[in-house]
Amino acid sequence: MTLSGVRIVPVTTEKQRRAFAGFPWRIYKNDPHWVPPLFGDRVKLLDPAKHPFWEHAELQLFLAMRGQEIVGTISAHINHRHNEVYKDKVGFFGFFEVIEDYPVAEALFNAAAGWLRERGMNHIRGPESPSQNEEVGLLIDGFDLPPVVMMTYNPRYYQVLIERAGFQKAQDLYAWDILTNIFDYDVQHLPRKFVRVAEEARKRPNLVIRKMDMKRFDQEVGIAKVIYNQAWEQNWGFVPMTDHEIEHLGAELKMILDTDLVYLAELDGKPVGISLGVPDVNQALLKAKPQPNTWSFPLTVLKLLWHQRKVNACRLMIMGVVPEYRTMGIDALFYVETARAAFAKGYERCEMSWILESNDMMNRIIERLGGKVYKTYRIYEKPV
């Protein structure tokens, strides 16, 4: 299809997929806050044969071409597990990157919406690249700092293009920033009621809060999956992860985990909660500057390992308790232990993300801890 000289090309070859994956390097060439991914990882994520998400989802990638030049990219995908859970017909878009040119963006959105409509979907939602378990949402404020690990980043003008195309807000996601140096080993600066709840939980003889056992990593990942799928079951847009997805995510996180930031809660030996913090390796990626080629990969890895030693921030990316145990103070105990560990290890700040705007309880807790919303991400939707 064409629009104002724009030609939309469905990706059908490996060469096109690699060109799709490499296009962001053009968009962010002069942006000091964009954190480039490892190119090989991004190519694998876009390959239905190499990422477990696509075992239950359909995908079509599109390139926007002007002459022989790529000027934009978008994915259209159907997460069948989502539609099974919510009994609806929602399709998704993701991996949206485009020059500052509305006709190009319009052509991309039309292509994605048309593909979804042909397959029976009645709404398009995004950006999700490709799901809430990877990178999700459009950054709409907080452009003055780079994103932390597994969070998104984009130019300011994307919001204008998306909303001009008729998309409306479906949900906002908050990223909270908290300075760990407001705590000390006695966490005396935490709200008294909060610390009291945590200490009462600690006294329960049948409750154990422990760190992840890396010697039993595979079994621990299995435990985490059970907790995760139960604790997040009622969250807006949540879709339970498959065994293969959680194993894949675990393998990726294993390379960057700091076990002092990972806790499991067990009550009478039953897993009931998990808290997962990870070092912000985006600090190291930003300095390693991965490139969209293969020959530079060994040097990139060496740079990454070198700069990773100096990471001074972390992200609390998962913290949840199985619903029937949420009144026992386990969440408070997770926060206290994480704060102590982060402070002791020299992490100067921690991002708690992402939190649904509709999750009033969690947002109130983080605010009481001294957190401030410093980035907002938006998920959009419209009929197709």
Image: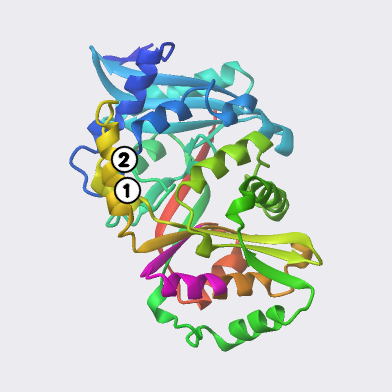
Which residue does the numbered mark 2 point to in the structure image?
A: 301
**Image quadrant where residue 122 sits:** top right
Placement of 11 over or under 219, stated as above or below:
above
How much space separates mark 1 and mark 2, taking CA atoms?
A: 6 Å
Near-viewer residue (349 or 151): 349
Amino acid type, residue under disc 2 in the picture: Val
Q: In the drawing, does residue 339 fall left or right of residue 312?
A: right
User: Mark 1–mark 2 contact, CB under 8 Å?
Assistant: yes
Which residue does the numbered mark 1 point to in the structure image?
A: 305
**Image quadrant where residue 238 sits:** top right
The quadrant of the image that shows the C terminus is top right
Amino acid type, residue under disc 1 in the picture: Leu
Q: Residue at x 69, y 65 (%)?
A: 265
Query: Which stretch appears magenta?
Result: 337-353
User: Residue 299: horizontal and vertical position, in percent?
Assistant: 25, 37
Q: In the drawing, does residue 12 fall left or right of residue 324?
A: left
Please name the colour scheme applied to the rendered image: rainbow
User: Residue 123: horizontal and vertical position, in percent?
Assistant: 58, 31
